């Protein structure tokens, strides 16, 4: 299974260029074990489902907000496409969650990456903490016009770096074949949305890194 996932990720690296060459794919210091019959999903897999769902729900809200406040049709259209990506992801995540037995809620408290090593990025609150997109919605609610456009793109660049990191980590380390396939295939659309946001950044004078950056390196509030 691990060989299949590695080959798939290598294939995506070739397709997506420099951004994939810096992907956060490192050996897992504490490999996840597939659950036996009657056991709950591994903690990291359950946390991925919860965090990814919260992130996608927030992206849908950002799309609704942008429909009202975006300064032009071009940005409004981009925001709508991103929201549509996450409407589909929300449905898929709900199906995947409902078909699995999850650990008790008190076992799903996010920890810092440095407590788990690189493979713990999925549970790093700076990488994909559940309230990030909702915080962006609240922050953007008070602005409009060009100010909204710039703030929206800046926020989305940060959010998408974290989404890419979240899905890459899950694809690399989960023992669940269905979750791994979901993470890999979903990552293609998330990466395309991030590329579109980087193109939009030029319009608002926002500097971006063309090669991307694994967000646990350097300042997570500035990485993009």
Image: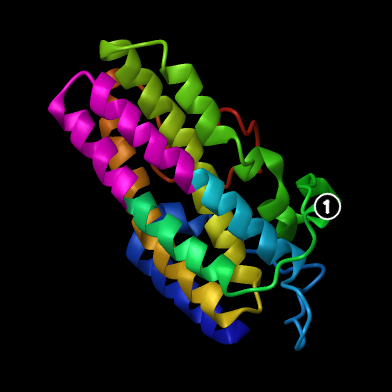
Dot 1 lies on which element? helix
Above-or-below relation of 220 to 216: above
Q: Could you say where residue 32 lies in the image, as x and y percent from the top left? A: 76, 74
**Extent of the magenta region:** 56-84
Q: Residue furthest front?
A: 98
Residue located at (81% from left, 67% from top): 29
Q: Is residue 32 visible?
A: yes
Name which residue lies at 53% across and 85% down.
4
* Residue 205 visible to the viewer: no
Is residue 129 shown left or right of residue 224?
right
Quadrant assignment, res 100: bottom right
* The one of 52 and 61 positioned closer to us in this rendering: 61
Q: Which residue is mark 1?
A: 106
Whether 70 is among the magenta residues is: yes
- Please provide percent x and percent y for residue 28: 74, 68
Res 41 → quadrant: bottom right
39 or 165, nearer to the observer: 39
**Is 191 displayed left or right of 128 in the figure?**
left
Q: Quadrant of the N terminus?
A: bottom right
Residue 79 coordinates in the image, percent (x, y): 28, 36
Q: Is residue 112 left or right of residue 126?
A: right
Along the line of sight, the residue nearer the viewer: 66 or 113: 66
- Number of numbered discs: 1
Residue at the image point whose x is 29% and y is 19% from the top = 204
Q: Residue at x 55, y 27 (%)?
A: 135
């Amino acid at each position: 299974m691990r060989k299949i996932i590695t080959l798939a990720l290598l294939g995506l690296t070739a397709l997506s260029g420099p951004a994939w060459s810096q992907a956060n794919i490192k050996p897992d210091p504490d490999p996840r074990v597939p659950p036996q019959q009657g056991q709950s999903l591994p903690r990291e897999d359950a946390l991925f489902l919860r965090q990814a769902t919260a992130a996608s729900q927030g992206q849908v809200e950002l799309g609704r907000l942008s429909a009202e406040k975006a300064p032009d049709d071009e940005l409004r259209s981009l925001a709508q496409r991103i929201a549509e990506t996450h409407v589909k992801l929300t449905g898929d995540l709900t199906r995947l969650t409902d078909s699995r037995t999850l650990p008790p809620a008190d076992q799903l408290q996010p920890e810092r990456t440095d407590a788990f090593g690189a493979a713990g990025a999925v549970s790093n609150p700076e990488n994909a903490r559940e309230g990030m997109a909702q915080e962006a919605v609240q922050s953007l609610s008070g602005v409009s016009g060009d100010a909204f456009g710039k703030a929206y793109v800046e926020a989305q660049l940060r959010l998408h770096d974290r989404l890419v990191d979240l899905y890459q980590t899950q694809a690399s380390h989960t023992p669940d074949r269905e979750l791994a396939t979901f993470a890999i295939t979903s990552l293609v659309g998330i990466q395309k949305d991030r590329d579109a946001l980087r193109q939009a950044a030029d319009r608002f004078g926002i500097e971006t890194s063309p090669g991307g950056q694994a967000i646990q390196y350097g300042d997570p509030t500035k990485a993009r």
